[in-house]
Image (tube, helix red, strand yellow):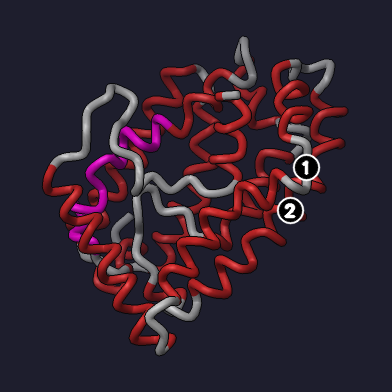
Amino acid sequence: MHSAISILTLTLLPVSLCLSTDESGEKFSPEEKEAIQRLKTQFDDACLRNSGSNVTYDEVMEAVALTPACVSSKISVEELFGDWLELNNDTRVAFFSKYCSPVKSSVVECLKPVESLALQCVRPEGQRVEAPDFPLYILPQVVDLLCEDYGAILFANNVVSPIECFQNYYSYIQSCMKNFVSETNAKVRGDYGEVECNVLKSARDCVAEKVDACGNRDLIRIFDLPYQAVIRETFCKNMI
């Protein structure tokens, strides 16, 4: 089921704050763990301050945890997984015609509770860049990109296997952004300066190198959706 988990993770909630290892098995540094805890505490405080309730943070976390189950209740993960393993040039039109619309509608519907609760905690411009950053409003665009021209991004550069690099993609992001929170000091986007922008660019370069080495450099376009969103919203637009 690893492939199915990869699909759902990239499509739904690719947030690695709760993960303790990267692709090499190396654990987060003490500095990163401390920064992650500080970020979580700041978010908890923001939920209390802006919503006026001490249970909003827990409600957000519960909504996040329930999202994969919500999507799974609306599509057959087992059937998706089986069809995914058979994906090739001969099956791609049928595969993406079958799954794109229900997956996108499920993602949009199932993320509404998370988005609604999260907005009680912080305004969009106050969101922190996490590890990796993947704002909720970007996820439908990710589905659209994967579905464009019947999965053309997966078949780019004449790859031998259209799913191999994609299945490793999330581990690439984990590895390249393993210390992202501590290196950017868990700052809100409005406080980004040259140091934080350089960290962000280095993370992007790292992911690009990995997907290029895997044989499908076009996959960086998935990372570029949230990356470009952050660039536009921060000081980084003046230097990257």
**Mark 1–mark 2 CB contact (< 8 Å):** yes
Q: Residue at x 81, y 47 (%)?
A: 101
Q: Which residue is drawn at 24% across and 49% down?
A: 199
Q: Helix or strand or loop: what does disc 2 sit on?
A: helix
Residue 218 drawn at (x, y percent): 55, 31
Residue 117 vertical placement versus 70 (above, below): below
Residue 86 on the magenta span: no
Horizontal side, residue 148 vs residue 13: left or right:
right
Residue 57 drawn at (x, y percent): 41, 71
Of residue 219 and residue 101, the one placed in the foreground of this image is 101
Question: What's the distance in space between the residues labelled 1 and 2, CA to CA?
Answer: 8 Å
Horizontal side, residue 154 vs residue 183: left or right:
right
In which quadrant of the rendered view does residue 213 lie?
top left
Which residue in the structure is indicated by mark 2?
106
Q: Helix or strand or loop: what does disc 1 sit on?
A: loop
Residue 75: image tag:
1
